[in-house]
């Protein structure tokens, strides 16, 4: 038997040593091996005021142990580490509230219904009618839109549930927001969502459980897996986003919400601010109308208490009078006064009665009657011709 040369032994020893090194490296456990590693989706840490994403995060002992790049997360994979491929799902910190302020009702609006105080709608149809009346009265003050507290869907009994589609059909252009007492249910139309678009990221941050600062190392591993990224949804309400899994302290919980319907569909803070401005404008218009009524009443009372002055000549008459005074008077023909001829004394008028004592008078009776009356007929003298002056001609 021949003895292998030194070179041949070295060639055989090198692969063996490499194999031993590889096997020993695989057996080495990371000092802080994670219980689970999540990667392969949109991981929204929600740790700041602006959206921040990481490629992967790890969980150990119920807490977030790492959040960052996939390469660094893989370094924490141990023998018992569970690697989870999100397959495009979105991860956000768990949310436990609606993301709304505790008081979403203006101070001067009670928790009882404020848009239909004089009505008690018992169905969705009657509520639409009450809202129509309320909106019409607001438009008289040049105010458009309704923010109604006291919305209670359970009060409508077996009538069809009021939906966003119903509000869109009844109020296509005016924003309408219905807030249930307690602020845990919001129903609005498309016009309201267009007028008051929400900042979904800030809504999600407001809905996180108290004390949470997002998916950061040291925080409790409370997070949700969603089928869509809320920040990338451009149409439809957030309630269409499904919660596929939810974890508390790194452990799966089965009684978690199924969707994000607890989140508002519009910026309620902006809607509330607009409602407060609307109420102030309505009150201002009421004060103006009341002042006008008082002014009109005062003028009327003052007019009735004063005696009416004598009617003064109208301006037209006064102008005509001044015009006549300025015009020269037309010369009138001088009336020639002639001495009236002295009237001769009128003879005694005696009416001749051709009958006397019912008997027709004869000429003799007439003469006798004339004499008895002292009437004498004298023949008229012929008129003398006027005298003319004749000049004697010299011979």
Image (cartoon, grey):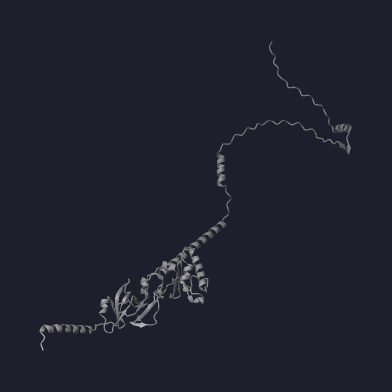
Locate residue 307 relative to residue 140 in the image: left or right: right
Dividing the picture into quadrants, the one containing residue 75 is bottom left
Give x and y (percent) for residue 138.
48, 65
Dividing the picture into quadrants, the one containing residue 55 is bottom left
Circle count: 0
**Closer to the camera in the image, 364 or 73:** 73
Locate residue 272 relative to residue 77 in the image: left or right: right
Locate residue 130 relative to residue 38 in the image: left or right: right
* Residue sitting farthest toward the top: 395
The vertical placement of 121 against 21, above or below, is above
Give x and y (percent) for residue 234.
38, 69
**Closer to the camera in the image, 295 or 35:** 35
* Residue sitting farthest toward the front: 1
**Closer to the camera in the image, 313 or 227:** 227
* Residue sitting farthest toward the bottom: 1
Give x and y (percent) for residue 73.
27, 78
Quadrant of the snapshot with the C terminus = top right
Whether residue 54 is visible: yes
Whether residue 44 is visible: no
The vertical placement of 192 against 353, above or below, is below
Quadrant of the snapshot with the N terminus = bottom left
**Closer to the camera in the image, 21 or 371:** 21
The vertical placement of 346 against 80, above or below, is above
Give x and y (percent) for residue 59.
30, 81
Q: Residue at x 89, y 31 (%)?
A: 364
Locate residue 150 relative to residue 210 in the image: left or right: right
């Amino acid at each position: 038997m021949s003895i292998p040369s030194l070179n041949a032994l070295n060639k055989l020893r090198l692969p063996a040593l490499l194999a031993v090194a590889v096997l020993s490296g695989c057996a080495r456990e990371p000092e802080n091996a994670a219980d689970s590693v999540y990667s392969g989706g949109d991981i929204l840490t929600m740790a700041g005021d602006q959206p921040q994403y990481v490629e992967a995060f790890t969980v150990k002992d119920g807490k977030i142990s790492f959040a960052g790049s996939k390469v660094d997360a893989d370094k924490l994979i141990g023998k018992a580490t569970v690697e989870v491929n999100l397959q495009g799902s979105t991860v956000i910190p768990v949310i436990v509230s609606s993301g709304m302020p505790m008081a979403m009702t203006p101070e001067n609006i009670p928790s009882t219904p404020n848009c239909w105080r004089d009505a008690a709608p018992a169905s969705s149809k009657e509520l639409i009618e009450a809202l129509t009346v309320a909106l019409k009265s607001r438009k008289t003050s040049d105010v458009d839109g309704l923010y109604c507290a006291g919305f209670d869907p359970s009060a409508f009994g077996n009538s069809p549930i009021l939906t966003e589609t119903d509000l869109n059909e009844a109020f296509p252009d005016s924003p309408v927001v219905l807030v249930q007492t307690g602020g845990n249910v919001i129903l609005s139309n498309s016009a309201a969502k267009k007028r008051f678009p929400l900042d979904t990221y800030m809504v999600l941050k407001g809905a996180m459980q108290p004390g949470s600062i997002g998916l950061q190392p040291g925080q409790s591993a409370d997070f949700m897996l969603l089928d869509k990224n809320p920040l990338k949804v451009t149409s439809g309400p957030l309630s269409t986003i499904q919660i596929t899994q939810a974890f508390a302290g790194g452990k799966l919980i089965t009684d978690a919400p199924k969707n994000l319907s607890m989140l508002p569909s519009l910026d309620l803070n902006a809607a509330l601010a607009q409602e407060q401005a609307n109420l102030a404008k309505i009150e201002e218009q009421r004060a103006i109308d009341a002042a006008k009524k008082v002014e009109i009443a005062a003028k009327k009372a003052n007019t009735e208490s004063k005696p009416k002055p004598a009617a003064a000549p109208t301006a037209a008459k006064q102008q005509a009078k001044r015009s006549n005074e300025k015009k020269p008077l037309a010369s009138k023909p001088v009336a020639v006064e002639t001495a009236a001829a002295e009237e001769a004394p009128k003879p005694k008028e005696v009416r001749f009665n051709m009958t006397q004592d019912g008997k027709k008078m004869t000429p003799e009776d007439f003469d006798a009657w004339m004499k008895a009356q002292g009437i004498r007929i004298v023949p008229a003298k012929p008129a003398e011709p006027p005298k003319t002056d004749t000049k004697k001609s010299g011979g």
